[in-house]
Image (spheres, helix red, strand yellow):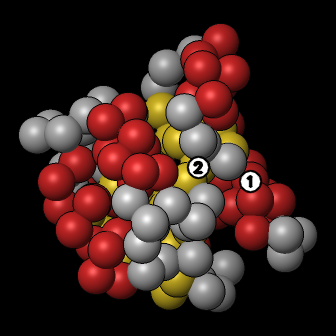
Amino acid sequence: MKILVVDDSRLLRSIIQKDLTIAGYAVVLAGDGDEGLQRAADESPDLILLDMMLPKTSGLDVLRQLKKNPATRGIPVVVLTGLSKGNEEKLTKEGAAGFCEKSEEAFKNNSAILIQTVKRVLGTG
């Protein structure tokens, strides 16, 4: 399964890529909202991990555009953000399939919480 990671932090992309690869996923990376939209269209990933605070096009705008585009509408999106859990309901209404806070806890033990969220959304765990 292929996962697109859209995050402007090079370090975080690297950590997530390593941990997802260890967990058996193919990983595609994007560093801003525009690149994320392009990669989603070009790569047809099985899931997108999407940061909300992105340069060029915001994560919320990326989510909205993904859900409007017939080619990407069906791809589940897990919001990966430093925003509080209180935003989960709003983001779910916008089309997010899952929510994972950017926290030390989420990235402990080879990103166990993040991987668990990915498996739940994909229906593989």
Image x and y of residue 51, in percent: 40, 41
Q: Is 78 positioned to the left or the right of 65 in the image?
A: right
Q: Say how many tags the image has.
A: 2
Residue 55 vertical position relative to residue 119 in the rendered view, above or below: above
Q: Is 27 positioned to the left or the right of 110 in the image?
A: left
The residue furthest right is 125
- Mark 1 crowdedness (10 Å alpha carbons): few <14, some 14-19, many ≥20: some
Label 1 secondary element: helix
Residue 16 vertical position relative to residue 20 in the rendered view, above or below: above
Q: Which badge, 2 or 1, comes first in the chain's sequence? A: 2
Task: Say whether residue 40 is visible.
Answer: yes
What residue did someone put label 2 on? 78
Image x and y of residue 41, in percent: 31, 74
Task: Say whether residue 51 is visible.
Answer: no
In the rendered structure, are the residues bearing label 2 and label 1 in contact, judged by CB atoms less than 8 Å apart? yes
Snapshot quadrant of residue 62: top left
Tag 2: residue type? Val
- Mark 2 crowdedness (10 Å alpha carbons): few <14, some 14-19, many ≥20: many
- Quadrant holding the N terminus: bottom right
- Quadrant holding the C terminus: bottom right
Tag of residue 117: 1
Label 2 secondary element: strand
Image x and y of residue 106, in percent: 64, 42
- Cα separation, mark 2 vs mark 1, equals 8 Å
